Image (cartoon, rainbow, N blue to C red):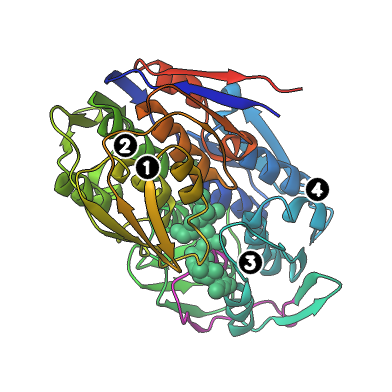
Amino acid sequence: MDSILVTGNGPLSGQIPIAGAKNACLTLMPATLLSDEPLTLTNAPRLSDIRTMTLLLQSLGAEVQALNDGQVLALSSHALTSTRAEYDIVRTMRASIRVLGPLLARHGEAQVSLPGGCAIGARPVDLHLRAMEALGAEMDLRDGYVHAKAPAGGLRGGVVRFPLVSVGATENALMAAVLARGTTVLENAAREPEIVDLAQCLRKMGARIEGEGTSRIEIEGVDRLGGATHRVVTDRIELGTYMLAPAICGGEVECLGGRIDLLQAFCEKLDEAGISVEETAAGLKVARKNGRVRAVNVVTEPFPGFPTDLQAQMMALLCTAEGDSVLEEKIFENRFMHAPELMRMGARIDVHGGTARVRGVEALRGAPVMATDLRASVSLILAGLAAEGETVVSRVYHLDRGYEHVVRKLRGVGAKIERIKGE
Ligand code: EPU
């Protein structure tokens, strides 16, 4: 297994290009299942999760071609051969559940493996299933699979009221409702930019949707959808991660393609911590020029709140802040796995349930560390960039799921980082 060697070496400067959003792309790709005409996605990120979704769609008979070095995905579902998403693929990536809504809407049935365990929390899929039921589907759990069947004549519009905000369940319900007969209303829907991106793409395909980006989305079902070309929205989590690099190491970095509206709550916390963020013609320029970062308190929430997917990276920043910070994780019940690893680097952190208190120290020291999920791994790289000495981050396959060319991007701004090939 490969690992990453990081050596702390002071301020960073230069530009980092931000890729298209992993989590938007992972929900745009299954939208191909809704139409027999081609769907072309541009600005796609080059990630192992995208390759996994490619394999899943291909296993259903969809054609997926990666062009232009993987930045363009040409998808077509004109001749699907299966409506069954197998355990072998689904267990490696929970986003696979996003084929349920489109398969059910266009083909009247789907069998999707239940995803199984996850490092950051239980992550059930009950809300996805309830949303399908609200559109008339019959759901049955057998042999580790969800067996879903639409009524004769197909799904019908309905009211889906989510008891808690779920990005994935909102996306599945949206994709199912675009081909359902009549009107569907999604209440307490997620408002993430990835949902807005999906709605915009579906609209280009001919869907009738109103209210995306608010907690009430209304969909008027249509008989069929056509093809479209769509540019994947900027990855706000990759953006926030790289904004934290100069915040932690000092210096000034411009994140190309960045927008404040994607990360308002996060930018407010950076400001409170003493980091400057400025909009430029090409993106966002982030700088920490003098002094230590100030401690801040963070509570993760659904969009537009502070994203859970930036909590680990923010913790890495706060480890060397002046004073104590409190981070509350409200989305996932077990998302502090990075804390003990950061403590191996000299951080002082107390975790109690969903709350972590970070007591700022002057400096971190390099150490061998390992991570159990994607955002935790990148938080350890960020910590390593600011630590004295060498940090080796193992289990890099987590990182490859969500960050393309991480070594190249960080080297481009002066970081000392390299990938070490394992056996
Ligand atoms: N939940 C349920 N039942 C459900 C669905 C969700 O109880 O049927 C709970 C979850 O267990 C969690 C909360 O609701 O506690 C929110 O989960 P959500 O459904 O919003 O998450 P998701 O759609 O599975 C997406 C991202 C995650 C990101 C979350 C929250 C994708 C592919 N994944 O997951 O991204 O953390 O939204 O913003 O879009 C990551 O990229 O590192 C990542 C984990």
Tell me how far mark 3 sits from mark 2, CA to CA. Answer: 36 Å
Q: Is residue 84 above or below residue 230?
A: below
Residue 72 image-quadrant placement: top right
Tell me how far mark 1 sits from mark 3, CA to CA. Answer: 37 Å
Give the extent of the magenta segment: 149-173
Q: Is residue 266 above or below residue 69?
A: below
Q: Mark 4 highlights which residue?
A: 59
Category of crowding for the residue at label 3, using alpha-carbon neighbours closer than 10 angstroms: few (below 14), some (14–19), many (at least 20):
many
Please state which of the two labelled residues, at mark 1 or mark 2, is closer to the viewer. Answer: 1
Q: Residue 218, percent across and down? A: 41, 74
Q: Is residue 380 above or below residue 333?
A: above
Check disc 3 and report its element: helix, strand or loop: helix
Q: Residue at x 24, y 43 (%)?
A: 321
Category of crowding for the residue at label 2, using alpha-carbon neighbours closer than 10 angstroms: few (below 14), some (14–19), many (at least 20):
many
Look at the numbered discs 1 and 2 and tell me whether their residues touch, using CB distance below 8 Å. yes
Look at the numbered discs 3 and 2 and tell me whether their residues touch, using CB distance below 8 Å. no
Q: Mark 1 highlights which residue?
A: 316
Look at the numbered discs 1 and 3 and tell me whether their residues touch, using CB distance below 8 Å. no
Q: Which amino acid type corresponds to the residue marked 2 in the rendered image?
A: Leu
Q: Mark 2 highlights which residue?
A: 244
Q: Which amino acid type corresponds to the residue marked 1 in the rendered image?
A: Ala
Look at the numbered discs 1 and 4 and tell me whether their residues touch, using CB distance below 8 Å. no
Looking at marks 3 and 2 on the same chain, the residue that comes earlier in the sequence is marked by 3
